Image (spheres, helix red, strand yellow):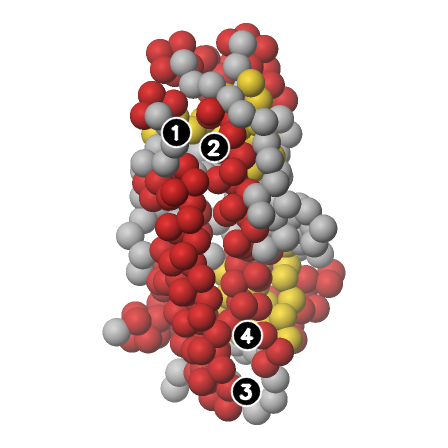
């Protein structure tokens, strides 16, 4: 059923419509992923059977990335492009124009058919929140789309792609349980997660938090007086223990709010990007563990400790 839906998706995009389905690659396929978190997932499935290029590097903001000359070269050479969809990448028109009809573009989050949540505040309120990977169960659905697509593009390695995806999905199931246990000690009255971008809706649903952000999506106006005052009012009502900022954003907005309200500031959390290889979120698993540990310690008022 998913492959049928994917075909409809591509045919709806004239620039990338592929007559007769996905052309199989005769050699190691050249695969592009739009940002570092998705790139890690593609790498987990593809392994040494693909040549992978990630457009948005670790530490960069995916929502408003500006394509570089090397990005355009990678897109011109690509056999397959994976992107999130749901308007995460605001620059996809350039990608479509560059790739043309030469290779399929796969919106992994959309093709996963995982239920979406709406953006909860700001200019994009009501649109699908694109940050599905903040729930490991949604991420497991991403892996299935990636494996199925790679198997179609490169049938010689199909069994390897599916085996890697299955193993990674089992790891994600264990991760989901691990994070739930880690966060279980936070009392109900402290389970309010306020971040700069309201990108933790799926995380909040998965682990029983209330969630809000200074703004709803990093593609919109950021840090307006109205946004700040709304969060100040929320803090006065619920008295959380800490505010959080994300790695691709400045902490100045939450620091300003904290100065007015007396709250602690904790961060960075990682959402739209992995860290550098020697950082706290060098891959998806590390990202989720780091975030969960930081959130737990901050909301319990504890010192951060390194998770073994």
Residue underneath mark 3 = 25
Whether pointer 1 and pointer 2 mark residues with C-beta atoms closer than 8 Å, the reply is yes
Mark in front: 3 vs 1: 1
Residue underneath mark 2 = 296
Residue underneath mark 1 = 186
Can see residue 189? yes
Precedes in sequence: disc 3 or disc 1: 3
Residue located at (73% from left, 60% from top): 69
Residue 70 position within the rendered picture, expressed as x and y whole percent measured from the top left? 73, 63
Residue located at (54% from left, 87% from top): 25
Residue 47 position within the rendered picture, expressed as x and y whole percent measured from the top left? 58, 74
Q: CA distance from mark 1 to mark 2?
A: 7 Å
Q: CA distance from mark 2 to mark 3?
A: 46 Å
Q: Secondary structure at mark 2?
A: helix
- In the displayed structure, 166 sits above or below 288; it is below
Q: Secondary structure at mark 3?
A: loop
Residue underneath mark 4 = 46
Precedes in sequence: disc 2 or disc 3: 3
Precedes in sequence: disc 3 or disc 4: 3
Whether pointer 4 and pointer 1 mark residues with C-beta atoms closer than 8 Å, the reply is no
Determine crowd level at label 1: few under 14, some 14-19, many 20+ residues with C-alpha closer than 10 A.
some
Precedes in sequence: disc 1 or disc 2: 1
Mark in front: 4 vs 1: 1
Q: CA distance from mark 2 to mark 4?
A: 33 Å
């Amino acid at each position: 059923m998913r492959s049928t839906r994917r075909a409809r998706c591509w045919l709806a995009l004239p620039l990338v419509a592929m007559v007769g389905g996905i052309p199989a690659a005769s050699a190691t396929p050249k695969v592009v992923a739009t940002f570092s978190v998705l790139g890690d997932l593609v790498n987990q499935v593809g392994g040494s059977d693909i040549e992978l290029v990630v457009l948005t590097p670790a530490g960069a903001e995916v929502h408003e990335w500006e394509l570089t000359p090397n990005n355009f070269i990678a897109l011109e050479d690509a056999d397959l492009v994976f992107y999130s969809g749901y308007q995460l990448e605001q620059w996809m028109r350039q990608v479509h124009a560059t790739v043309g009809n030469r290779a399929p573009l796969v919106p992994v989050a959309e093709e996963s058919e995982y239920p979406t949540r709406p953006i909860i505040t700001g200019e994009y309120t009501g649109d699908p929140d694109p940050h599905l990977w903040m729930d490991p169960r949604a991420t497991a659905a991403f892996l299935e789309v990636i494996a199925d697509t790679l198997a179609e593009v490169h049938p010689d390695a199909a069994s390897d792609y599916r085996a890697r995806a299955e193993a990674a999905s089992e790891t994600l199931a264990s991760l989901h349980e691990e994070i739930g246990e880690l966060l279980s000690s936070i009392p109900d009255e402290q389970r309010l997660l306020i971040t700069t971008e309201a990108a933790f809706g799926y995380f909040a649903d998965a682990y029983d938090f209330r969630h809000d952000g200074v703004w709803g999506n990093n593609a919109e106006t950021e840090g307006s007086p109205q946004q700040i005052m709304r969060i100040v009012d929320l803090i006065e009502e619920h008295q959380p223990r800490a505010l959080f900022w994300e790695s691709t954003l400045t902490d100045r907005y939450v620091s300003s709010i904290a100065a007015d309200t007396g709250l602690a500031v904790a961060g960075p959390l990682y959402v739209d990007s992995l860290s550098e290889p020697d950082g706290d979120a060098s891959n998806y698993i590390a990202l989720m563990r780091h975030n969960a540990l930081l959130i737990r310690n901050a909301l319990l008022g504890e010192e951060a400790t390194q998770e073994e």
